[in-house]
Image: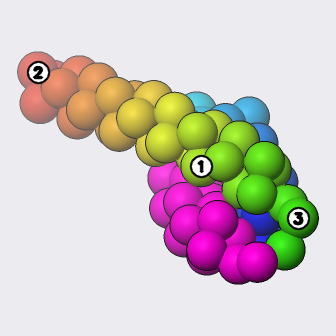
Amino acid sequence: MGITGFVLGLVSLIFVWIPYIGLIGAVLGIIFSAVGMRAQTGSKGLAIAGLVLSIIAATISLCVWGSLFSILAHL
């Protein structure tokens, strides 16, 4: 699960500029990374990295959404 969370966090960070894909990938990355951190397997480092990447991607994605709605509100 930690590897899946890491991959989702990385992909969502790359596609953060596409509104739905970045946010959905980041939320799924947070979920899978949290599950991977609780597991007793050896991929806890990747789970932590995935969690960090997913949180960064979610933050950037929410900023992009806020900027988009702010621009559209002024039209």
Q: In the picture provided, is 6 more to the left or to the right than 3?
A: left
Q: Amino acid at mark 2?
A: His
Mark closer to the chain start, 2 or 3? 3
- Is residue 72 at all visible to an observer of this figure? no
Instruction: Say whether residue 71 is magenta.
Output: no
Look at the image and tell me in which quarter the C terminus lies: top left
Write down the quadrant of residue 61 in the picture: top left
Secondary structure, magenta segment, majority class: helix
Please state the horizontal and vertical placement of residue 35, each as a whole percent of the image.
Answer: 61, 75
Q: Nearer the viewer, mark 1 or mark 3?
A: 3
Q: Residues within 10 Å of mark 2 (few under 14, many from 20)?
A: few
Q: Nearer the viewer, residue 63 or 73?
A: 63
Q: Nearer the viewer, residue 62 or 6?
A: 6
The quadrant in which the N terminus is found is: bottom right
Instruction: Name the front one of labels 2 and 1.
Output: 1
**In x, y percent, where is residue 69?**
22, 35
Image x and y of residue 42, in percent: 88, 65
Residue on which the image places disc 3: 42
Q: Which residue is mark 1?
A: 51
Q: Are marks 1 and 3 in contact (CB under 8 Å)?
A: no
Secondary structure beneath label 2: loop
When the figure is inspected, residue 36 is found, relative to residue 73, above or below; the finding is: below
Q: Amino acid at mark 1?
A: Leu
User: Extreme left residue here?
Assistant: 74
Q: Which comes sooner in the sequence, label 1 or label 3?
A: 3
In the image, taking residue 3 as reference, residue 64 lies left or right, namely left
Query: Hey, what amino acid is under mark 3?
Result: Gly
Task: Name the residue tied to disc 2.
Answer: 74
Magenta residues span 18-40
